[in-house]
Image (cartoon, rainbow, N blue to C red):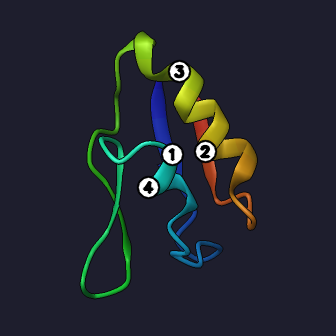
Amino acid sequence: MRISVNYDQCESNGICSDIAPDLFEIREDDFLYVLNETPEEDRREDLEDAVLRCPKQAISVSE
């Protein structure tokens, strides 16, 4: 699976990084960074939670 972020929609509010800090990070510049664009299958549950809880629906997952 592959993580994609629509940075035009992303507010960098950090919900995703709270859910999956090994996949997402908000840095000092207040921008979201994807730390691992192709996580292992065992990260799917947290990743799907991050996708669902993103207030701007800026995160997506493709297979």
Secondary structure at numbered mark 4: helix
- Name the residue type under label 1: Ile
Going 59% across and 79% down the picture, which residue do you hit?
11
3 to 18, vertically: above or below:
above
Residue 36 spot, x, y in % from top left: 28, 39
Label 4 or label 3, whichever comes before in sequence order: 4
Residue located beneath label 4 in the image? 17
User: Which residue is denoted by mark 3 in the rendering?
Assistant: 44
The mark nearer the N terminus, 1 or 3, is: 1
The residue located at (28%, 88%) in the rendering is 29
The reply to whether discs 3 and 2 touch (Cβ–Cβ < 8 Å) is: no
Q: Is tag 4's residue or tag 2's residue first in the polypeptide sequence?
A: 4
On screen, residue 38 versus residue 15, left or right, reads left
- Per the model, the C-alpha gap separating discs 3 and 2 is 10 Å
CA–CA distance between discs 4 and 3? Answer: 14 Å
Three-letter amino acid code of the residue under disc 2: Ala
Residue 63 visible in this rendered orientation of the protein: no
Which amino acid, by three-letter code, is at mark 4? Ser
- Label 1 neighbourhood size at 10 Å, few (<14), some (14-19), many (20+)? some
Q: CA distance from mark 2 to mark 1?
A: 6 Å
> Where residue 33 sits in the image (x, y, percent)?
33, 62
- Element under disc 2: helix
User: Which disc is residue 19 wearing?
Assistant: 1
Residue 58: give x, y in percent of width and height: 65, 60
Outermost residue toward the bottom in this view: 29
Sequence-wise, the earlier of marks 3 and 2 is 3
Discs 1/3, front: 1
Q: Residue furthest top?
A: 41
| Residue placed under numbered mark 2 in the picture | 50
